[in-house]
Amino acid sequence: MSAGQFQPIAECGLTPQPEAAGYHRQWLVANDSGQWLNRELCPRLAEVTVELRLGYLVLKAPGMLRMDIPLDVIEDDDSVRYSMMVGEQAIDVIDEGELAAAWISNFIQVPCRIMKVHPDTPVAVWPA
């Protein structure tokens, strides 16, 4: 990743938008087993483009309608809060819901979900 490039969803596309700096790797994609998906496991993640627009994280991918996810909403419903491992670190994540899950699953052809990293447990070090 080059300087001035940010990746709001870990392993998805980069954006040069300066306002994306505060959202760098604040989301990730996890499979149904709660495993974090990287490009090695799921190369199609690289085809998902991401930009910030009017308070939303906007996802686009070939052959898909765009997907908008609110940037600064943290769901306080514990039924959508999970713990998962990223490398050696346990983090809390918030499930972004059924529509986001259907969108990413349909595109990468693997049942998975888009998760937001909870601000109380940020990822200290992302695995290489």
Image (spheres, rainbow, N blue to C red):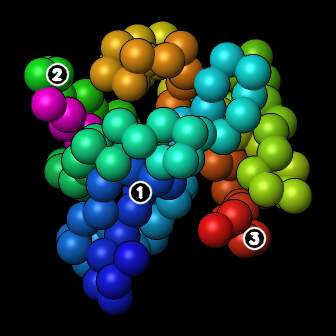
Asked whether residue 65 is in view, the answer is yes
Q: Position of residue 72 (x, y in %)?
A: 45, 48
Residue at left 55%, top 21%? Answer: 112
Label 2 SS: loop
| CB-based contact (under 8 Å), mark 2 and mark 3 | no
How packed is label 2: few (under 14 Cα within 10 Å), some, or many (20 or more)?
Answer: few
Measure the C-alpha gap from mark 2 to mark 3: 32 Å
Q: What mark, if any, has residue 124 been given in the picture?
A: 3
Q: What mark, if any, has residue 39 been given in the picture?
A: none
Label 1 SS: loop
The span picked out in magenta is 57-62
Amino acid identity at mark 1? Pro
| CB-based contact (under 8 Å), mark 3 and mark 1 | no
Quarter of the image with the C terminus is bottom right
How packed is label 1: few (under 14 Cα within 10 Å), some, or many (20 or more)?
Answer: many
Amino acid identity at mark 3? Ala
Write down the residue under mark 1. Answer: 8
Q: What mark, if any, has residue 64 been given in the picture?
A: 2
Residue at left 64%, top 48%? Answer: 117
Q: Position of residue 97 (x, y in %)?
A: 51, 18
Q: Is residue 49 above or below residue 124?
A: above
Nearer to us: label 2 or label 3: 2
Label 3 SS: loop
Amino acid identity at mark 2? Met
Say which of 48 and 54 sits in front: 48
Measure the C-alpha gap from mark 3 to mark 1: 15 Å
How packed is label 3: few (under 14 Cα within 10 Å), some, or many (20 or more)?
Answer: few
Residue at left 72%, top 34%? Answer: 35
Q: Is residue 37 above or below residue 78?
A: below
Side (left or right) of 74 relative to 51: right
